[in-house]
Image: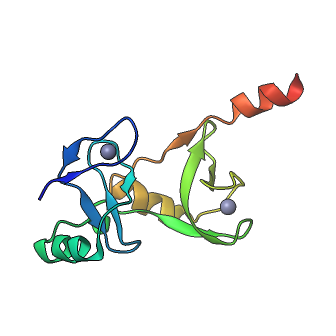
Amino acid sequence: MNITCNNKGCMKSSAALLDTKTMEIICQECGRSISNISPAMKTALKQAGQIVRTNAKKAFSVLCKTCNGNREVVLDEKGNTMCKICLKPINVSTSFKLAMQESGVQLEKVDTSKDNKTETK
Ligand SMILES: [Zn+2]
Ligand SMILES: [Zn+2]
């Protein structure tokens, strides 16, 4: 089932997927949500199984005490684990790190040096 994206600069037709958590339709061309979809269309997509498979990619998240929520863990350039949202350090257990390595999850690396340079100007 192809849906035409109504986002500026896209307007392409793709097999857009329904995110069952947010009930948003995600365009497969630009990755943005398409806003003009009727509830009936969403139901049809759900029944057709044209939905975002969230468990396809295993996300490793831990509770961040700084911004108070389950956040994805990322690495800075020194290999320290930190919160993806507030970029404050998060201490994860070695077994947690090991589990991530075993599942082949590559931690996203965040370049914090850029921010430091602008601050020292
Ligand atoms: Zn699009
Ligand atoms: Zn945080």
Q: Quadrant of residue 53?
A: bottom left
Ligand 2 - quadrant of the structure image: bottom right
Residue at 53% across, 40% down: 109
Where the N terminus falls, by quadrant? Answer: bottom left
Please, is residue 110 above or below residue 41 in the view?
A: above
| Residue 87 at x, y percent in the picture | 68, 51
Residue at 40% across, 40% down: 8
| Residue 89 at x, y percent in the picture | 70, 55
Please state which of residues 76 and 56 is positioned toward the viewer in this rendering: 56
| Residue 116 at x, y percent in the picture | 79, 31
Residue at 15% across, 71% down: 49
Where the C terminus falls, by quadrant? Answer: top right
Please, is residue 53 above or below residue 9 in the view?
A: below
Left-right relation of 73 to 12 = right
Q: How is the image coloured?
A: rainbow
Q: Quadrant of residue 19?
A: bottom left
Residue at 57% across, 65% down: 93
Q: Residue furthest top?
A: 121
Left-right relation of 1 to 18 = left
| Residue 20 at x, y percent in the picture | 32, 74
Please state which of residues 82 and 120 is positioned toward the viewer in this rendering: 120
The number of callouts visible is 0
Please, is residue 62 above or below residue 116 in the view?
A: below
